[in-house]
Image: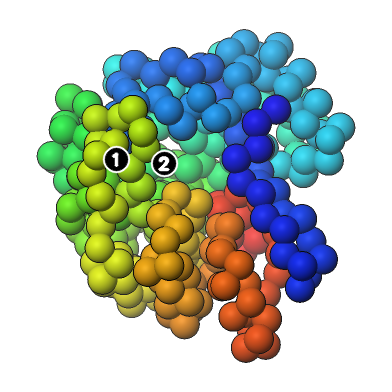
Amino acid sequence: MPNDHYLYVPSLGKELQGCPPVSITGSYCALRCKHCNAKILERMVPAETPWKLVKVVEELHKRGAKSVLISGGSNQWGQVPFEEFVDAIKCIRGLGLRVYMHTGLVDEYRAQLLKEAGIDAALIDFTVEERVVREVLNLGVAPENFIDSVRNLVRFSVRVVPHIVIGVYRGEPSGEKRAVDALKSLNPDAVVLVVFTPLPNTPFGNCHPPPPTYVSEVLKYARYSLPNTPLSYGCMKPHRESYQLLEIEVIQLGFDGISFPSYSTVEYIINENIPFRVLQECCAYIAVQK
């Protein structure tokens, strides 16, 4: 099974691996967003039926997984079609695994199903920028649908962790501060910030990540605007040295987590005697541990 994220830290004597991602649509996505073009799905373990999902996760559990990330491509309405997988998810929860789930847009009915399934946290890419919705995500819905999705999940007491992709519009400013402002009144359980990183063979493959100075500006704005909300610097981010320095910055800003930090960041944490825990978990764990 694929394992895209791996880190060995000699100072800790630990081998770190990620929360295994599973796609319930295989490599299929109706939207094929311009920054992804379904390429991220190709890295996931395919499980296109409820039976296969249970079998795949049982195998992951035997290999030592304590949690699983259920994901998948979106349909034309921006929804990950999980409706037929509710019983399978209940079965997985019965194994004692934590279940994190990329949900796509969520109406009241889908929020109620997620509550019934008992997932630990719903992850949703969050934007309020119309040009992002139409020109990046290829969706014909209003940006308000993203706000309503978070509101529906909160209403049904499903932990919700919006993800903001900094620079998702070709590496340019993409309404991130407006997204942060919108989340102030929605009370999500946590927020994850990631950075647009061009993927080969996508429409945005020849674009550049947003400048580190702009990323820094957004990270500071999020921390100061959401002082009581757990924040994490997530998986997707460039790994060049100028971007690695941002990991030190989020520590200094008081972020609650960093996914797959660079070696230099781990050494900084150790050398500065900063208290920390090593978790082989999804970035949304900061919402579960509250």
Neighbor class of circle 1 (other Cα within 10 Å; few <14, some 14-19, many 20+) is many
Q: Amino acid at mark 2?
A: Ile
Indicate whether 267 appears above or below 137. Answer: below
Q: Residue at x 62, y 25 (%)?
A: 45
- Judge by depth and name the residue closer to the eye, 103 or 202: 202
Quadrant containing the C terminus is bottom right
Residue 108 lies, in percent from the top left, at 40, 31
Quadrant position of residue 90: top right
Dot 2: what SS? strand
140 left or right, relative to 209 = left
Q: Is 178 placed left or right of 290 in the picture?
A: left
Question: Which badge, 2 or 1, comes first in the chain's sequence?
Answer: 2
Which label number is shown at residue 124? 2
Residue 178 is tagged as none
Q: Position of residue 243 (x, y in %)?
A: 39, 65
> Where is 237 relative to 118, above or below?
below
Question: Quick one: quadrant of the N terminus?
Answer: top right
Would you say the residues marked 2 and 1 are in contact, meaning their CB atoms lie under 8 Å apart?
yes
Q: Give the labeled residue for mark 1.
A: 146
Amino acid tagged 1: Phe
